[in-house]
Image: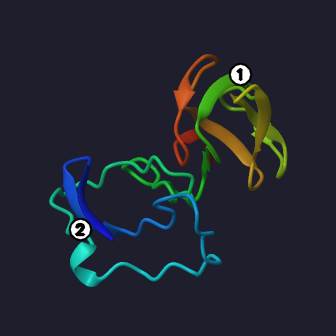
Amino acid sequence: MRKFRITVEGTAYDVTVEELDEGGSAPAPAAAPAAPPPAAAQPVPSRATPAPSTTASAPTPQQPPAGGSGPGDVVSPLAGTVQKVDVSLGESVTEGQTVVTLEAMKMLTTVVAPRPGSVKEIRVQAGSSVQEGQVLVVLG
């Protein structure tokens, strides 16, 4: 057993590593499930804003930008670039009608009206970058 201290993004972790095959002559034992690290090895966040994860673990849900959305707001389901605004100011739309087309990772995504109404505001234009949860169009 060997002990190491590893620092990741400014947070120090004390770890113990077991050398399974020191001389190469003895076969390694069957893999056993790893036990969770002791409580002392868990870091205590020292920042108010957590650093983004660089591992391939489950994604963390993103919060919509400040301001929220109202009942007539059509919001972006993902981060991307506005390919096309499919409606014009004052136009009447039906539920399910495409209002904006987004491009993300070379794929097009249509954003549809969640309810019927008329277009009161268009908050984006073709070429705009948008974030998940950002208001694209306001229906009245």
When the figure is inspected, residue 36 is found, relative to residue 104, above or below; the finding is below
Identity of the residue furthest to the top in this view: 127
- Mark 1 or 2, nearer chain start: 2
Q: Position of residue 92 (x, y in %)?
A: 77, 39
Q: Is residue 91 left or right of residue 136?
A: right
Tell me if mark 1 has few (under 14), some (14-19) or many (20+) residues whose alpha carbon lies within 10 angstroms of its own.
some
Task: Classify mark 1: helix, strand or loop.
Answer: strand
Measure how far apart labels 1 and 2 are at the Cα level.
43 Å
Which residue is at 51% across, 78% downward?
34
Residue holding disc 2: 43
Which residue is at 55% across, 45% downward?
132
Mark sitting on residue 83: 1
Q: Position of residue 33 (x, y in %)?
A: 57, 81
Residue in the foreground of this view, choosing between 16 and 60: 16
Colour pattern: rainbow
Q: Quadrant of residue 108?
A: top right
When the figure is inspected, residue 16 is found, relative to residue 39, above or below; the finding is above
When the figure is inspected, residue 123 is found, relative to residue 132, above or below; the finding is above
